[in-house]
DNA sequence: CTCCAGGCGTTCC
DNA sequence: GGAACGCATGGA
């Protein structure tokens, strides 16, 4: 049975116009935005609120209904369907992940189950690269604070829902602000890395659109020319910013999870085109299941 | 106080 | 080629 993409409809809740998607499957809004792939959304009173693609959007999930306010059906079709990954058949992807890793590999099986509902967002390339440079040797709440502060300080201002909002800063704005301005945002040693990335994009030494046509390995090598971009940052950028779903930064950190169960190591080659998605499931498995069970001790 | 957080560059062997 | 170390910052 083939996947039927959810169809957006205009509706109204509490007098407010919004877009509704009915009968969505394999989608958990709270997990999608809390799983560490995206740093500009926050959940409050069941509403996920943030800025992406230069626009403010509020998202509320009620069972298999998904409500998007601050947008229109036309804009959903143009931007948010792909951004949210609602154009993809995650039932099939998850089956593929389990098959490639082996259904008898209990870690992956449990991870897919634990991470059920997570989708890989198709985020802006520059925002993804910059955010994951900031992520290094840092924790998610502080990454979110720095990204938020930087957007407020250097991003283009616009109004939404009667509030001032800020787009993610352009490379030009960051380069113009300079390292001292980034230091004031408490970026620490990452200030020079973000500046180097911005400078390379501005002067054309790095063409982020050129990565679209590269293989995963070519994209890795290309992005790693930026000072402060190693394998981990490059892989996360390729996965979340370019949707190159085979990206798998296993050498850097995910092995930690697997070694708990496979002290002798497991074969990480030929994991298929969704290895990056499996990687994110493992990250969430640790974030939501392992960490929580350790907290209970 | 120390340890850690979605790492990376440098230095040294 | 890989191990050890420093790096800014803030929370636990």
Image (spheres, coloured by chain):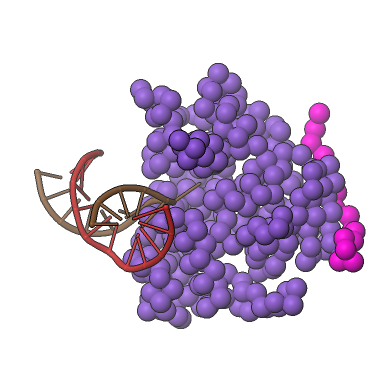
Chain colours: A purple, B brown, C red
Quarter assignment of residue A109: top right
Q: How many marks?
A: 0
Q: Nearer the viewer, residue A237 or A12?
A: A12
Residue A70 x %, y %: 78, 66
Q: Nearer the viewer, residue A190 or A78?
A: A190
Q: Residue at x 36, y 61 (%)?
A: A227
Report the residue that reaches farthest toward the top.
A104
Residue A211 x %, y %: 52, 55
Residue A282 appears in the picture as rendered = no
Q: Is residue A225 left or right of residue A169?
A: left
The C terminus of chain A sits in image quarter: top left
Quarter assignment of residue A163: bottom right
The N terminus of chain A sits in image quarter: top right
Is A97 magenta? The answer is: no
Q: Is residue A212 left or right of residue A203?
A: right
Report the residue that reaches farthest toward the front.
A297
Q: Is residue A161 left or right of residue A147?
A: right
Residue A240 x %, y %: 56, 51
Is A13 magenta? The answer is: yes
User: What is the span of residues highlighted in magenta in the rendered image?
Assistant: A1-16
Q: Nearer the viewer, residue A55 or A288?
A: A288
Q: Residue at x 76, y 50 (%)?
A: A61
């Amino acid at each position: 049975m083939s996947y039927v993409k959810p169809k957006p409809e205009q509706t109204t809740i509490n007098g407010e116009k919004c877009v509704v998607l009915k009968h969505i499957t394999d989608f958990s809004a709270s997990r999608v935005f809390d799983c560490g792939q995206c740093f500009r959304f926050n959940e409050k009173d069941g509403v996920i609120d943030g800025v992406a693609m230069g626009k403010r959007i509020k998202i509320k999930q009620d069972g298999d209904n998904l409500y998007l306010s601050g947008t229109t059906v036309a804009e959903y079709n143009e931007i948010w369907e792909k951004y949210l990954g609602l154009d993809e058949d995650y039932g099939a992807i998850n089956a593929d992940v389990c098959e490639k890793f082996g259904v008898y590999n209990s870690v992956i099986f449990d991870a897919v189950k634990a991470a059920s509902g997570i989708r890989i967002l198709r985020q802006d390339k520059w925002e993804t690269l910059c955010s994951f440079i900031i992520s290094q040797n840092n924790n998610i709440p502080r990454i979110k604070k720095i990204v938020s502060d930087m957007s407020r300080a250097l991003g283009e201002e616009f109004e939404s829902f009667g509030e001032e909002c800020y787009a993610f800063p352009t490379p030009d704005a960051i380069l113009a602000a300079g390292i001292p301005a980034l230091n004031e945002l408490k970026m620490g040693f990452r200030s020079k890395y973000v500046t180097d990335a911005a400078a390379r994009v501005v002067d054309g030494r790095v063409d982020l659109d050129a990565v679209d046509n590269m293989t995963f390995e070519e994209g890795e090598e290309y992005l790693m020319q930026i000072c402060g971009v190693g394998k981990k940052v490059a892989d996360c950028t390729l996965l979340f910013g370019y949707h190159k779903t085979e990206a798998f930064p296993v050498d850097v950190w995910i092995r930690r999870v697997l070694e708990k169960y496979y002290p002798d190591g497991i074969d990480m080659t030929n994991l298929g085109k969704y290895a990056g998605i499996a990687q994110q499931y493992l990250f969430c498995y640790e974030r939501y299941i392992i960490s929580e069970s350790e907290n209970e001790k």
